[in-house]
Structure formats: structure tokens, C-alpha cells
Image (cartoon, rainbow, N blue to C red):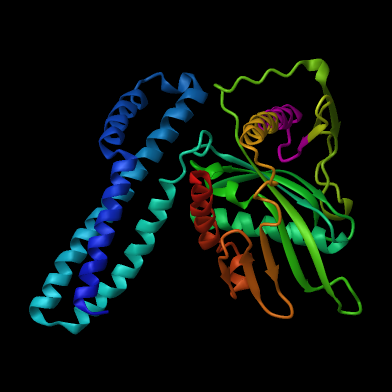
Amino acid sequence: MAAPEIAESLAALDTTLSSVEQVLDVTTLNAEVAELEVLASVPNLWDDQANAQKVTSRLSFVQSELARVRSLRTRLDDLGVMLELAEAEDDADTLAEVGTELALLTTSIGELEVRTLLSGEYDAREALVTIRAEAGGVDAADWAEMLLRMYTRYCERHGWSFDVYETSYAEEAGIKSATFAVKAPFAYGTLSVEQGTHRLVRISPFDNQGRRQTSFAGVEVIPVVEQTDSIDIPEDELRIDVYRSSGPGGQGVNTTDSAVRITHIPSGIVVSCQNERSQIQNKATAMAVLQAKLLERTRQEEQAKINALKGETAGSWGNQMRSYVLHPYQMVKDLRTETETGNTAAVLDGEIDEFVESGIRWRRQQQSI
């Protein structure tokens, strides 16, 4: 890339980063850090562990956000200086180095810009993700397990903590369903664009005739409830069952009846948790999942009323949202954004950033129509 083109790209990046800094409101974030540092230094902070966790987590997040913005601004400024030196000394090697750093910086600023698009009511929250096998028999169960791995690998790549609350294993292979929590700021806003039906086309490893099979799995993403959410669930609307946790093929993984299943009778919603050894802990986690699902149900009902008033009759944008083809060719294609790649192995190993980011941009565009 020639020096004038690089200079033009740097100017465009500077405009984008300035816009991001304005949206994030760096001045307000600095003030918030100062306030949180005072709260975090209170001697008896940890007497209330829930509040202490909230304060320290928020402080860590805001400090990280500010450090990220400052780092990008420093890199951008330094790149401008390097370009001037390269031009002054007619240094082709330095100019090439500037071009390489420009590409990396463009990606980094683009990722942060996408984050500023997450301004929904619940976007900043942690997420609860449920994956279910749908049509396709044993292949669908195997596909659901592949998606579970894809999303947990995505979380690992981003350094996001996650807990698998419940896994229901299929008899032959794969899983019937799984629910896990992603404990990272803006996890809901980020992953909510992954909600919908995911379609897999491949040669079935479970077909002795080697025929091509199409299978489906559904992904549900809902925000984690907070103490400020008002969700009152009468005891007489709940049926609580306890059972023994099990692993693949029915293998017992716990010798006590610690797993908990809660059924909300009016709605028919069923949630389970088996990841803790304590029945009390599993019940508390299952109740939190149930509250999150009821909150999301209420939100969807309210949105449906708004859509009806607007005259919208189309189904949820999330249905049939992406195809993964492994045979007769290799391609993953998002049916909403038209984003696609032939590197299916990388996608199934959690490299889905391009799809997530294009989905967020697509959603914002749809909301502005």
C-alpha cells in the first residue's frame, strides 16, 4: 500500500476511533473508575459478598475498557509518526511495517466499534445459552454437541468464563440439550445474534451407507436476571424434582440425588441443573435460569404486541439463520448477512467473530429501518 493510501486510511480510522470514544464517553468512565475505587477500598466491602463482587467486577471491566481505548489511541498516534518517518527517509521496510500494523489496528478498532452497537436494554448482561437437537435424529444430537463445543471454544478464545449448568445426553451419540452461562460483560448482546436454527449438511458418520444427511439444532440466548428484575414466582406454580446426575451413555457421575429439575407449571418451562455437588446450589442455579427464561418470555410477548401494532407479520429473524455445509463442498454461510467462509474447521473450532460482528451490524441496521 502506498503512503498516500495509508495516510487516508489512518484519517478514516481516527474518525472512527473518535466516534467510539464519544459513544463510550471516556470522561464519564474515568469518573466511574474513581468512584468504584473508593467503594472497593472500603474495609468491610466483603461483608456483603454479592455487592462486593458487583463492585469489583464492574471496576475491572471499566478499567479494561479504558485501557483498551487508550491502547488503540496510542497505537494509532504512533502509526502516524511511523508513517511520517517512513516518508521522510523513503524507508520501504518501515512503510511495509506500517501497512501490517494498519491492518491489525483496523481490525481492533472495528471490533470495538461493534461493541458500541450493543445498546439494548439487556445487552450489557451475562448470557444463558441453551442448545437443543432438532430434526435429524442421532446426527442432530451430534450436531448439537458440535455447536456446544464451538461456542465454548469461542468463549475460551475471548477469555470469557462459562459454566455448563446441565447436559442431557442422547442415547447413541451427542446431546439432546445443554445449557451454559457465559459470565462476561455484554455476553448477551454479543451472543444474542446467534439465536436461531443452525443447519448442518454432511456425510453422516452414523449411516453405514455413507449418505448425506441434513440435521438441525436450535440455539436460544437469554440475558441473566439481576436483583433489580421483578420476577415473583409463587411456590404453588413450581414442581421440583431431584435426581442423580448422569454422563454419556447413562454413566453415573454423582452418587447422590443432587441434580434438580424445576417445572414452571403455567408456562410448561422446564429447567435443570446438575453441575454442582450440592442440591441446594443446583436448585438456586436452576431458579435463576427459570427466572431468566420467564423474563425473556415477558420481553418477547411485549415485543410481539409492538410488532402487531406495527403490522409486522414476519417470523423471528433468528430462525434458519446459518448453514454449515461439509459435503459436497466446504462452506459456512449466514442467511441474514450473507457472510460466508470456506474454512469450516476454524468456524467449528470457535472462530466465529466475523459472523457475530456482521450479525450485530445487521441487527442494528434492521432496527433502524
Kindly indicate the quadrant of the structure image that contains residue 128: top right
Q: Is residue 259 visible?
A: no
Q: Quadrant of residue 270?
A: top right
Magenta highlight on residue 277: yes
Q: With respect to residue 267, does 60 lie above or below?
A: below
Indicate left or right for 228 with 250 as reference: left
Q: Is residue 189 depicted above or below 109 in this figure?
A: above
Is 123 above or below relative to 318?
Answer: above
User: Quadrant of residue 244 in the image?
Assistant: top right
Q: Is residue 48 visible?
A: yes
Q: Position of residue 157 (x, y in %)?
A: 52, 58
Residue under the image location 60 percent in, 34 percent down: 224
**Does residue 229 appear left or right of residue 200 in this picture?**
left
Query: Would residue 199 appear left or right of 68 to someone viewing this image?
Result: right
Q: What residue is drawn where x is 62% and y is 55%?
A: 151
| Farthest front residue in view | 311
Residue bounds of the magenta highlight = 271-292
Tally of numbered tags: 0
Please, what is the dominant secondary structure of the magenta stretch? helix
Verify whether residue 316 appears in magenta: no
Q: On the rendered image, what quadrant is the N terminus found in? A: bottom left
Report the residue that reaches farthest toward the left.
88
Q: Position of residue 340 (x, y in %)?
A: 58, 69
Q: Give the residue displayed 36% in from the left and 44% down from the top.
A: 64
**Is residue 51 left or right of 257 when viewed as pictured?**
left
Q: What percent of the width, then of the height, locates residue 107?
A: 38, 63
Residue 285 image point, x, y percent: 68, 32
